[in-house]
Image (tube, rainbow, N blue to C red):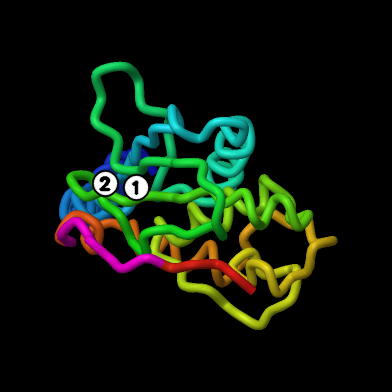
Amino acid sequence: MPFRTPALALVGALALSIAAAPAAGASAATAPQHAAALATTTLYYDDSQAAEFKSAVVAGAQVWNANVRNVRLVEAPAGTTAQIRIIAFDGWPQSTLGPVRPGGRGTVYFGREAVDEGYNTTRIAAHELGHILGLPDAKPGPCSSLMSGSTGGVSCTNATPNASERAAVERNYGGAVAAAAQPVAGGTVTDAP
């Protein structure tokens, strides 16, 4: 019996070291991929020209920040170049169709015409920021789809992206795709009904 204990201990230690070696190697090999998948793109927005819609813009950015992890919308601190400008104007809301990336530029025109007709300001902001993040309109569509825009109806106050909208933004800003992508200078999407 005394001879078996050291032998078993030696065999156990050898088995543990062999089992641990591939795991450590695999972990080291996948660490850069894992880090890339966890990288978050920060996009800065400038709402200094958003006039009466500043609080709606902040709420719309918070909606996206609460629902996706690969991109963050942050108000640009003084001295920081913003990738997204928000400008209040009298027409229908419109935006640059992204995905806008660091080094790129996009503009949201927060249209008073939709607000005057009764559309929810937070939904408008989140919808227009969805365009900046690369989502096209999904019209006609139900209120449960943020990107259905005005076809959700004036009574629709849903400002939360649905699962497919969230997944599309995660893909647009996920890992190696985002790192290799060039800044987009997309066209403008107007959200009139």
Query: Dot 1 lies on which element?
Result: helix
Give the SS element for disc 2.
helix
| Image location of residue 4, percent across then percent down | 33, 47
- Please name the residue shown 36% across and 27% down the image: 76
Residue 153 in percent (x, y) is at 78, 69
Give the CA distance from mark 2 to mark 1. Answer: 5 Å
Give the number of marks: 2
Residue 138 lies left or right of residue 72; in this view the side is right
Pick out the residue farthest to the bottom: 140
- Is residue 133 inside the magenta stretch? no
What residue is shown at x 73% (from left), y 68% (from top)? 144
47 lies left or right of 176: right
Magenta segment main secondary structure: loop
Magenta span: 181-188
As rendered, which of 13 and 9 lies closer to the eye? 13
For disc 2, the neighbor class at 10 Å (few under 14, some 14 to 19, many from 20) is few
Return the residue nearer the eye: 53 or 92: 92
User: Is 160 left, or right, of 5 in this rendering?
Assistant: right
Q: Position of residue 138 (x, y in %)?
A: 57, 78
Quadrant in the rendering for residue 86: top left
Residue lying furthest right: 155
Q: Residue at x 66, y 83 (%)?
A: 140
Q: Nearer the viewer, residue 186 or 142?
A: 186
Q: Is residue 49 above or below residue 149?
A: above
Q: Are marks 2 and 1 in contact (CB under 8 Å)?
A: yes
Which residue is labeled 2 in the image? 35
Q: Amino acid at mark 2?
A: Ala
Q: In the image, which disc is placed on residue 188? A: none
- Report the residue marked by disc 1: 38
